[in-house]
Image (tube, helix red, strand yellow):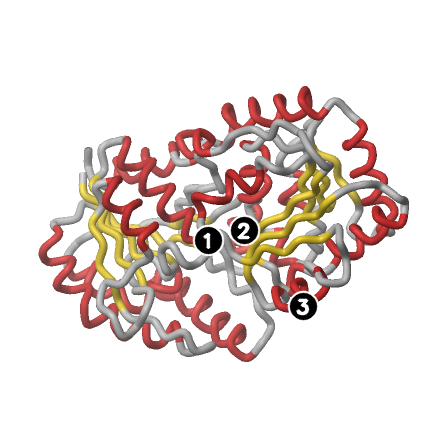
């Protein structure tokens, strides 16, 4: 069974690329031989990847082909699509693929050769554009165009990351039926549960962007510090507010900002935590998401305090989840954190880990996709 996956994520560089590698590994364990086509890390170097991504692909037995994608905001989709059109025909002709997964950023550069080669393909939607800048508006143009091409140029279905995203696109009359939901998952075996020793530590990792109102973490931490509580807050990730966070960290002895971490260091980082926190705003774009970070925190056995929005509520009522209204005062967030720090963290963390094993492992979240791919391959 041969699968082609065309993704716009730079493997091993983009934080979100862990999804592509994890899904690929899960499908490989089910018998799929996967070829990944993705942007190379450095446009001046063919097939350049981080050592971490190279190791992941090699260990999984996958094949990789690199294409160019500009790092300049607003130009990535244009250069990526153009290079796909040049390189993908040879890859497809040599690959004898049974089926293909094409992320929406890659549809314009991929659909023609796949249709011509009679390779059934699904449009994959891990997230609509997030940013509100000029580059973001250009991405929205490409997003709408991708769905239009998918619905008129031969896509045989769509793979959104959540039921909310599927319903939203259906309302805008751009979904491609049938729908196969691919929720965020986690390789639970990679995470070592926290032992809750040392100074109580609040952790967060992910995209550190203004669009996520990430500076609210500092506001919450300041309230906790004002109460005289001995604690640390450790933040890891990258984004347009990283520099501001790092400057702020020099003003607070309780705050540590590490910057981006390789995916294989994230489990170790989370194991230092006692409580995770995510005050994500209630913007439309976040209502459509699938909470990957929440699932990783559960795998690490971390209780968590989250904003009371659709993706966080989708986890269900769990003893290890505390929800706070988005517009609640920061004191409410501090109250929830303080209550958890006084609770039986070992017992609560064990529940989180057990739920992650039963519900969030990639072997569970990729099952529907595997069945659909098998059907399309005629197997």
Question: Which sits earlier in the primary sequence, circle 2 or circle 3?
Answer: 2
- Which of the labelled discs sits on residue 3, or is there none? none
Q: Quadrant of residue 290?
A: top right
Q: Is residue 292 left or right of residue 158?
A: right
Q: Are marks 2 and 3 in contact (CB under 8 Å)?
A: no
Q: Quadrant of residue 172?
A: bottom right
Q: Residue at x 48, y 71 (%)?
A: 139
Q: Is residue 207 left or right of residue 20?
A: right
Placement of the C terminus among the 4 image quadrants: top left
Q: Position of residue 373 (x, y in %)?
A: 28, 40
Q: Position of residue 108 (x, y in %)?
A: 32, 68
Q: Nearer the viewer, residue 51 or 79?
A: 51
Q: Which residue appears farthest toward the left when viewing the image?
A: 94
Q: Are marks 1 and 3 in contact (CB under 8 Å)?
A: no
Question: Which sits earlier in the primary sequence, circle 1 or circle 2?
Answer: 1
Q: Which residue is mark 3?
A: 244
Q: Which residue is mark 1?
A: 16
Q: Position of residue 120 (x, y in %)?
A: 24, 50
Task: Compute the Cα span from label 2 to label 3.
Answer: 31 Å
Q: Is residue 85 above or below residue 217?
A: below
Task: Compute the Cα span from label 1 to label 2.
Answer: 17 Å
Front tag of 1 and 3: 3
Front tag of 1 and 2: 1
Q: Helix or strand or loop: what does disc 3 sit on?
A: helix
Q: Are marks 1 and 2 in contact (CB under 8 Å)?
A: no
Q: Which residue is mark 2?
A: 165
Q: Nearer the viewer, residue 68 or 288?
A: 68
Q: Dot 3: within a 10 Å radius of its alpha carbon, few (fewer than 14), some, or many (20 or more) residues? A: few
Question: Which sits earlier in the primary sequence, circle 1 or circle 3?
Answer: 1
Q: Is residue 29 left or right of residue 88?
A: right
Q: Helix or strand or loop: what does disc 1 sit on?
A: loop
């Amino acid at each position: 069974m041969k699968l082609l996956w065309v993704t716009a994520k730079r493997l091993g560089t983009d934080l979100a690329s862990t999804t592509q590698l994890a899904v690929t590994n899960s499908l490989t364990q089910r018998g799929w031989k996967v070829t990944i086509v993705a942007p190379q890390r450095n446009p001046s170097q063919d097939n350049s990847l981080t050592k971490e991504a190279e190791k992941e692909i090699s260990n999984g037995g996958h094949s990789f082909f690199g294409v160019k994608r500009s790092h300049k905001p607003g130009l990535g989709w244009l250069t990526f699509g153009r290079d796909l059109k040049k390189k993908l025909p040879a890859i497809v002709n040599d690959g004898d693929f049974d089926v293909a997964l094409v992320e929406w950023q890659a549809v314009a550069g991929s659909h023609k050769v796949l249709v011509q080669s009679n390779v059934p393909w699904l449009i994959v939607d891990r997230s609509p554009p997030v940013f509100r800048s000029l580059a973001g508006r250009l991405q929205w143009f490409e997003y709408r165009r991708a769905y239009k091409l998918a619905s008129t140029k031969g896509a045989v279905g769509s793979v959104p990351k959540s039921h909310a995203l599927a319903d939203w696109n259906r309302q805008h009359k751009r979904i491609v039926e049938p729908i196969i939901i691919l929720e965020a998952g986690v390789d639970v075996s990679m995470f070592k549960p926290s032992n809750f020793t040392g100074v109580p530590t609040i952790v967060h990792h992910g995209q550190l962007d203004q669009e996520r109102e990430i500076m609210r973490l500092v506001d919450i931490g300041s309230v906790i510090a004002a109460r005289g509580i001995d604690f640390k807050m450790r933040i890891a990730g990258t984004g347009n507010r990283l520099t501001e966070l790092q400057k702020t960290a020099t003003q607070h002895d309780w705050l540590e900002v590490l910057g981006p971490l390789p995916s294989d260091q994230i489990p170790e980082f989370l194991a230092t935590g006692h409580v995770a926190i995510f005050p994500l705003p209630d913007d439309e774009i976040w209502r459509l998401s699938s909470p990957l970070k929440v699932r990783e925190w559960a795998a690490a056995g971390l209780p968590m305090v989250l904003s009371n929005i659709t993706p966080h509520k989708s986890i269900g009522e769990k003893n290890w989840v505390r929800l706070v209204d988005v517009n609640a005062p920061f004191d409410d967030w501090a109250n929830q954190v303080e209550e958890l720090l006084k609770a039986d963290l070992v017992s609560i963390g064990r529940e989180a880990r057990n739920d992650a094993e039963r519900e969030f492992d990639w072997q569970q979240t990729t099952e529907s996709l595997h069945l659909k791919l098998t059907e399309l391959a005629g197997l």
